Image: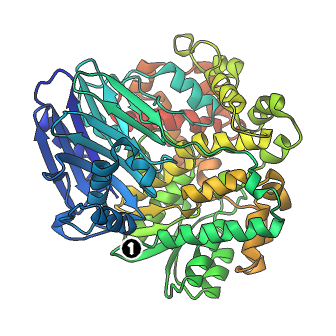
Amino acid sequence: MCGLAGEFRKDATRADVVAVERMAATMCDRGPDGSGVWSNGPVALGHRRLKIIDLSAASGQPIVDSATGLSAVFNGCIYNYRELRAELSAKGHRFFSTGDSEVVVKAYAEWGLDFVDHLIGMFAVAITERDSGRLVLARDRLGIKPLYLAESSGVVRFASTLPALLAGGDVDTTIDSVALAHYLSFHSIVPPPRTILRGVRKLPPATVRVYEPDGRSHERVYWSPPFLRRAEHADWSEKDWQDALLESLTRAVRRRMVADVPVGVLLSGGLDSSLVVALLAGEGQRGLSTFSIGFDAVGGREGDEFRYSDIVAKTFDTDHHQIRVAARDLVPPLEAAVAAMGEPMVSHDCVAFYLLSQEVSRHVKVVQSGQGADEILGGYHWYPPLARVDREQALDTYARAFFDRDAAGLARVLNPDWLAEGDPAREFVAAHLAAPGAQTAVDAGLRIDTQIMLTDDPVKRVDNMTMAHGLEARVPFLDHEFVELAAACPPELKLAQGGKGVLKEIGRRVLPHEVIDRPKGYFPVPGLTHLEGKLLDRVRDALSAPEARRRDLFRTDYVNALLDAPNAELTPLNGNKLWQLGLLEMWLQSHGID
């Protein structure tokens, strides 16, 4: 787990090493344990290292492999690197380190652009060929590791964070009006390749992109699981599905213990993270470090779920840590969390994850987390309505539950100069839901949430907030083999028992019933859903700042109405609409975008 950066000159001039150094320097939080820069003519690579596997200098980056003529920078973790190393050694490759980064390079040397098909893990990687001058960029199947790009006619720059690209300079920071429409409509999700800035794009998940020395580029999407019933599962019973998913999830949890440092768990007290703890205990882990966070209640809403996480910690005898945060402490960590965001994210979970990661990083460098189970196994409230409609009605049903605004709503919020043509979010979602490869409306909803929403909301949130403290987060529910199996599982098994029925039945085998038979919880930060006091003042300041007035994104009458009644207007997902606008301005101002 690290931060990478680089530049590729399409015009064959020398790469700007100083710019790459500036980019890499912004990511010292992601990689506090080491740094390096390498260049060769039109290519320069920079890296910040977090030591997790092979703690020696041999696994420092950039990787320069004279035997294969390849140089690379890598961010992530390859959980099957030991098996791949043995396979590649048998094919004649020789290794100078014992880490996973070199295995990625040797895999490319052996299999070329198909190397990604052999990798099990989370990764973003840039590989350059000495002999051809080609640059190859790749991102993992679920987009767990980010990769941003700023491209012009003569140069391509890339980095693990958007702010790193800004530090490189010469980036068009104009607001992208289509991305702005997505942000305000699709619950802050801006699907790839766009970002909120016109001059920055992101490589989509499961994508390999190749830049040739003459400037041409091409890419392929190497993975997309079908959400269809398979013939080989036709005679499976409900128990067969439970057994298969349990076996696959246990393997995913076991894989994510690969490290040369201790691995802990972020334990919310919900089914998903509790199941991770239970499965690790079943694999023989003793004295496992677990961490939970809670906040003061605000507006009558509770801010912790300690009663549940305590049950799990006691059952499995973990080394448990409770982290309590008073409401008056939220403004400084809010500022820090916004600064750590690669893109604006409205979820109040960001502050919780930021504070949790800050504390956890004092104890361990790697944690497993339960993110992804709701999207993979049908845990959200908008899936049951999809089960009652056919594919043609999926768009309206999904939009009613998930969209914050339609085109008319955007016209009430945005000044005319910032309105995009049509209704970009609705058009995007309509195309995704209607695409082949999903059998039912539920399958189509699960697919867009797995491939789009999950990547650009909870996964990005966890990556940004944990890496702000040099903490690596691993997500076993996003093991691609588990995702493939879950995608094939009949929707009725996933939606049973109010959602995640098949997972709840798995949980009954290993967890106390109190953790399973309980109302669905969220990572609660009441102070950010019920705006008042200093937090409300901070939002007001952001929306009235000189930069905000110059940008003039939002209609004054709309903003004033929200400020007069800050908690009156919520999204269908109970997000605060005033917070959504204020957060965007806070993010832009935090990153010096005028």
Residue at 24% in and 61% down: 92
**In this rendering, position of residue 160 left or right of residue 442:** left
Is residue 25 visible in the rendered image? The answer is no
Residue 149 picture location, percent across and down: 34, 33
Residue 57 picture location, percent across and down: 16, 66
**In this rendering, position of residue 422 left or right of residue 52:** right
Residue at 23% in and 60% down: 93
Query: Where the N terminus falls, by quadrant?
Result: bottom left
User: Which residue is disc 1 drawn over?
Assistant: 364
Q: How is the image coloured?
A: rainbow
Front one among 286 and 523 = 286
Q: Label 1: how many residues lie within 10 Å, few (<14), some (14-19) or many (20+)?
A: some
Determine the residue located farthest toward the right in the rendered image: 388
**Amino acid type indicated by mark 1:** Val
Q: Where 240 falls versus 14 (above or below)?
A: below
Residue 192 picture location, percent across and down: 49, 33
Is residue 388 visible in the rendered image? The answer is yes
**In this rendering, position of residue 587 left or right of residue 301:** left
SS at mark 1? loop
